[in-house]
Amino acid sequence: MRNDLSRDAETRLRAALAHLETLAPAPPALPSPVGTSSRPLWRSPVVAFAGFAAALLAGVPLFLWLRSTDSVTAPSTPTTHFEASTTTTPPPGEGGFPWPIGWSEAPGHSVTGRTFPIIVWTGSEYIVWGGEKPSEGEWHKSGAAFNPSLGRWRDLAPSPLTPRSEHAAVWTGTEVLICCGRQIGSLNSAGAYEPATDTWRVIAQPPISPRFAEAVWTGTEMIVFGGSGNSRGAAAYDPATDTWRTLADLPYRLERQAEAVLGDGVVYAWPSYVRRGDTVAPLAYDIESDSWRSLTIPESLDTPLAPSLIWTGDELIAWGLARSFESDYGVGLAFDPASGSWRALPPTPLAPTRPSDGSEASQAAVWTGSQAVIWTGWIGSEWDAPTTSILAYNPETTSWTDLDPAPVQGIGMWNHPLIWTGTQVVAYVSSADSVLIYTPDPQGTSSSADVSTTGTSGTSGNALAADLRIEGTRPPYTFEETQAYGEFGPVLWGLVTTLSGADEIPHGPAYEWVDWGPLWAGHQPDPGPYDVYGVTDLSAVDPDAIAAVVPIGSTIVLREVEWSLDQLEEFIELLIVGASENRVCSTGFGMTPNRVRVVALAPGPVLGDVPREALAIEIVDDCLVYVPAGTSLP
Amino acid sequence: MIWSRHRDELIRYATVLVGPAEAEDLLSTVVLRVLQRRSLTELRHPRSYLFQGVLNEARSLGRRNSRRRLAGDESVPPIEVDPGVLDAVLRLPERQRAAVYLTYWRDLPIAETAELMGCRPGTVKRYLHLARSHLREVLDEK
């Protein structure tokens, strides 16, 4: 890269950079992380004087230092760590750790990174116990508790239980009851852990030993069920009497990754690890009558689904990834117990995904009391970058919200890894050695994007397309090619990241997104005409829409056109002109719009020799300014 | 140890991104935020973590008050510094300026620049190209 400038140009550039660097004040002393004030602690008068002296000794112009110290009177505004969030740190709760709005990465522990541990929320702690690390080929019997309010882990007392994974657990209000699971074979032992005293006790031996166990807490009993063959069964444990009772057997196997939820006296479960010939219908267990029944699968569901389950208080929500030949796509269903019928949720604003090598896709869900938070994605492979989407569904408004992108990608979600603490979502990501915490903006001004689900054009101010399909006409580029091409075009990169709700776009041959590679071909040694994908066929967009309205199910067809690099940059300049005329959010002189949003369609002017038929774009670099209907666009 | 090892290069980096008047506050904010979560010794890659924090904070600062920052610095540059080039560098968006600084002044390879910026090497190349296109006129690089 360095030979792109002449020696003289580089010399002058280096001189300017060197000059800037010499203006640096003395570095601050390392503060003590006491208190939550946003004002740096070392900005005390004493330290200020010391800094003043240091600045003088360092030759820093006096007026610069005075300007710096002047700023003490104006406390700096704290900002969130992740750039997707633009709001300030919320006031901590009572004794609460000041997690910023948006995603935070909490320190990990030796228990993080395990697969199939139990994860239980006690109301104040996030308890992880057992599990395995496939790379280490061992099962664990240790555990730890993470307190989000303190931001700290503590080790649990040694457990009398044998090491295991894929076991089941519930929180009774005072104890974590743990049952069953597997080590090499199925285990029919159980125990209880009391966080208040950090003590364990072995409880009565369960009459069943499902190796892939699920459990729910009824208020008085733990109902455990699952398994296959001889290990299949269901039983209930009463901690008051330390006794088990055997329940009616399941009508068919229920194995790995099945999820269960309790709602109005009924335990719902959905087989998810199905084999050829398996029954895939969801199950409902009626506690009072001790009976199981299969729920009819919606006719519209023509592919096996392995959903996560949520009980909203009124109905059962099942959301999972359905796999077709070409892609995985999100399917959401709601079951009304009163009528016994299913209805489809509004289409999930999730771009179709397509793990090219069958790499494992999964999801997790948690109910916040008003919304279902869905985390989905798949683990990357040698050729596929991992990806993650986090969405929230509000049953009351039947709308989806695209939450801020998580700071990590690549998930393997098992055994209820999402916890809602009442104020935050805590996620156990088995592929990471940390815990993720999502703190919603209490003012509701997060950078999350509401997503239209009604299919009515022109109704939602910042709606994005649901079920949007973006198709390329060129074979996908390889990972190496996209790297060589310098990633994505600045314009369409922003468009796609906005539409996909992620700051990062996965690379790899499985992703049609990577077709943007050649759009930015700036550093190629031989500039010339490049293959560029233009967004052209947007005729379905309602031009009267105020912002970002692409009807549900509409297709954006990417057509391969040829733009020279100069033409491309001219186009970018047009966008910047639009910004400078206050029609859109200004991003500053010369700043490439890196988050853009389709707002309307209009017959576009000709750019070079290429008709520019579409692309009325709003620049939304962390602020939203809507283009009024009828506004002429650059 | 970690802080004393990196504080000088961090304050210089912050100064290049936001100017001397706000560099110290910016760095203070970044470090304080890190320490609220963990100690520096707990970071696996403290240098790149802190560099990324400085860049992110600079970008946030730029969004909040780009006009003030773009007004430039009030110091008088030495004779060998071309005011036009200096002005053009100051007008670069933070990420482009960071890429230019780390690559052209610190002489870091693309891979290390990418690590410190928290992005991929290809992205650094894109920032560098954008920066050069913005600097082209003043550098007479037609």
Image: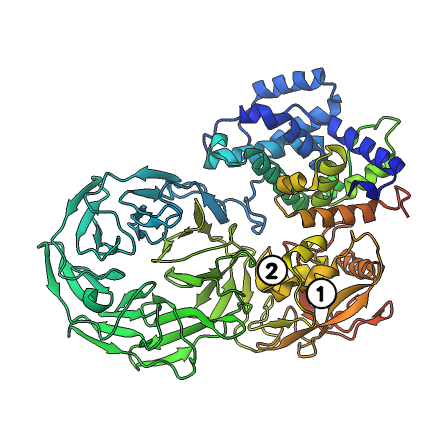
Residue A224 image-quadrant placement: bottom left
Q: Nearer the viewer, residue A64 or A558?
A: A558
Can you see residue A37? no
Q: Nearer the viewer, residue B26 or A244?
A: A244
Q: Which kind of residue does numbered mark 2 sit on?
A: Gly
Which residue in the protein does label 1 denote? Answer: A617
User: Where's residue A291, x and y in %?
Assistant: 18, 75
Chain identity of mark 1: A
Colour setting: rainbow
User: Where's residue A461, x and y in %?
Assistant: 60, 68
The residue located at (57%, 35%) in the rendering is B29
Q: How many marks?
A: 2
Q: Which kind of residue does numbered mark 1 sit on?
A: Ile
Mark 1, other Cα within 10 Å: few <14 / some 14–19 / many ≥20: many
Mark 2, other Cα within 10 Å: few <14 / some 14–19 / many ≥20: many
User: Where's residue A620, x and y in %?
Assistant: 66, 58
B62 horizontally vs A125: left or right:
right
The residue located at (58%, 23%) in the rendering is B4
**Disc 1, SS:** strand
Q: In the drawing, what numbered circle is on residue A508?
A: 2
A505 horizontally vs A531: left or right:
left
In this view, the mark in front (2 or 1) = 2
Q: Nearer the viewer, residue A14 or A443?
A: A14
Label 2 to label 1: alpha-carbon separation: 27 Å
A524 horizontally vs A512: left or right:
right
Tell me the quadrant of the picture where the C terminus of chain A can be found: bottom right
